[in-house]
Amino acid sequence: MNLQPLLDYTFLGLPITHIGIAITIFLTTLFLKNILAAIILKPLKTIAKRTRTKTDDKLISVIEEPLKLTIVLLGAYIATLWLPFTHFDHIVDLFIKSFITFIIFWILYRVVDSFSNLFNFFSSKFGKELNEDIQHFMIKAMRVLIIALGIMAILQEWGINVSAFVASLGLGGLAVALAAKDTVANLFGSLVIFTDRPFKVGDWIETPVVEGNIEEIGIRSTKVRTFAQALVSVPNATIANTPITNWSRMGKRRVKTHLGLTYNTSIEQLKTILEDIRAMLAAHPDVHKETIIVNFDEFESSALSIYLYFFTNTIVTKEYLQVKEDVNFKIMQIVSKNGSQFAFPSQTLYVESLPK
């Protein structure tokens, strides 16, 4: 059978044999890309396994998929050599350069994902509870930057004036920034919170706008669970520019109060009560021993006022209230044991004479 007429057949001015060879080369690289990539990476993986660090293993995993695409593109380029499109050589070169640029920035994009542990290490400097927020923020910012630079590099390859494009983006960005100034302010507010660390998740804070426990620290806002169990979202710009009292960092919690005893209490009774209260507080396991003040303070209109000032070892509200309650019960026992009573607002009327 004479195949020469078939071999001499042309399609779109190209020999059918060249078209067949080009298709064969492209399909071969397409189907063998995984095998070829494995062959190329095998010695590198062997070396990486012998090292203690995991960085080289991550680098290999980062370049694996781009390497497969590179093999396919290389096959496509070799295939085009069998197709003499003389009028399209310039366009083919542009496509090749664009794909090379794309692969480079794709590798950089994957590096950001694969090396998230570096962001995690960096964000751990700001407190463990904030790691996830900072890590996500930095990864997203790096992704946007890499994508923008990649698009600009590809546009530059095609002869598009990137400088004018960037200038227009600058004007547009200024307009967007003015329109979204609150969002930008919240973004910078979150950075202030991440770096200054005035609080962390779980802390009890008080500000002029809200008081409660920190439940979540986000990029735009901070969520605070109030003691009424309402969830309040405070913009980070607001919370970063207001005074913050972090009660969770007290170390100890203050109790400051006055007791009123009746004027029937004698001096000896009062001295004994004061000594007994001091001894009780000093022996209490949940009362801080350094600062205990119990003194006869002043004469009030209806009571002899005793001033109490001390600290509890706990700062947890529930435990703090339990300590106060226990101390109050013990004070009641001390006052009762010494034959005195608590005073309450009262008036004494003296009647000089009764009407007849």
Image (spheres, helix red, strand yellow):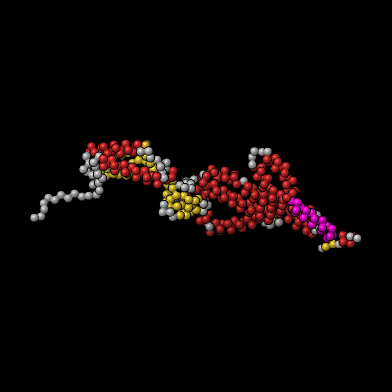
- Taking the image as shown, residue 24 lies to the left or right of residue 244, namely right
156 vs 232, nearest the viewer: 232
Q: Which residues are magenta?
A: 13-33
1 vs 15, nearest the viewer: 1
Query: What is the x, y in percent for residue 51?
Result: 66, 38
Q: Is residue 268 above or below residue 82?
A: above
| Residue 207 seen by the camera | no
Which quadrant does the N terminus fall into? bottom right
Q: For the point 47% across and 54% down, which residue is it?
A: 233
| Residue 227 seen by the camera | yes
Q: How many marks?
A: 0
Query: What is the x, y in percent for residue 187?
Result: 53, 52
Predominant SS of the magenta segment = helix
Q: Is residue 74 magenta?
A: no
Query: What is the x, y in percent for residue 76?
Result: 76, 54
Query: What is the x, y in percent for residue 331?
Result: 30, 42
Which corner quadrant of the image does residue 48 belong to?
Answer: top right
Q: Residue furthest left?
A: 356
Which corner quadrant of the image does residue 158 belong to?
Answer: bottom right
Q: Is residue 16 magenta?
A: yes
Q: For the point 31% across and 43% down, which residue is it?
A: 329
